[in-house]
Structures are given as C-alpha cells and as structure tokens.
Image (cartoon, grey):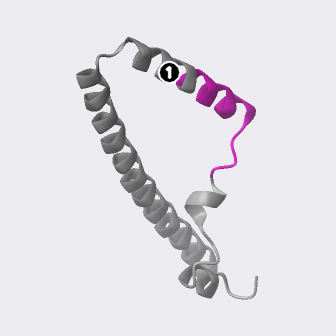
Amino acid sequence: MDNPIKELWHGNIIPQEDSRTNSKEMNELLGYMARHHEDLEKSFTDEQKETFEKFHDCWSEYMSLAEAAIFEYAFKLGMQIAIETLIK
C-alpha cells in the first residue's frame, strides 16, 4: 500500500468491512443472537413482527452511525498520537 490516504479516498480501504474479523467469542454470540431472534419471531403476531422489523432497521442504522463516529474519533486520536510522537 503506497499511500493509505489515497487508498482510503478511492475506496480501496474499507475500515468498516476490514474491522469485522470476528473472534470465536463474537461468532458464538452471533449464533446465540440469531437463534434468539428466530425464537422471538416465531412467537410474534404479524403486527409484532412488523414492529420488531422496524426496530431492527432503526438499530442497524444507529449502529452504522455509531461505527462511523467511533472510526472518526479513533482516526483523530491516532493522528494526535502520531503528531505528538513526531514533535518530540
């Protein structure tokens, strides 16, 4: 990777995809979540399923915004550390 800033700008680096390398524990948790999700949906009425789907959509959008904010914060923090290191 010659210039990571250019690569990021051109979309060749996608941090939100690259950061999703799940650990064993994360994969286990995803399995539990999927099973519980299925169990919940089986017990819902059609109206409850619709409400749950709307909740799920909102949660996904929220998580996407939160991940972007975390990335921005971490990037800025990393740059501050790098600048501080170069100054000293």
Image spot of residue 66 (x, y percent): 39, 51
Q: Is residue 73 magenta?
A: no
Which residue is found at the position 67% from the left and 26% from the top? Answer: 28
Q: Is residue 45 left or right of residue 8?
A: left
Which residue is found at the position 34% from the left and 47% from the top? Answer: 62
How packed is label 1: few (under 14 Cα within 10 Å), some, or many (20 or more)?
few
Depth check: give the residue in front, 83 or 21. Answer: 21
Predominant SS along the magenta part: helix
Question: Tag 1, which secondary structure?
Answer: helix
Depth check: give the residue in front, 1 or 53. Answer: 53
Magenta span covers which residues? 20-33
Q: Is residue 8 left or right of residue 60?
A: right
Quadrant housing residue 22:
top right
Q: Is residue 68 above or below residue 1?
A: above
Image spot of residue 54 (x, y percent): 28, 38
The quadrant in which the N terminus is found is bottom right
Q: Is residue 51 above or below residue 88?
A: above
Please give the residue where the numbered disc 1 appears in the rendered image: 38
The amino acid sitting under disc 1 is Glu
Residue at the extreme front: 46
Q: Is residue 29 above or below residue 19?
A: above
Quadrant housing residue 23:
top right
Image spot of residue 65 (x, y percent): 37, 55
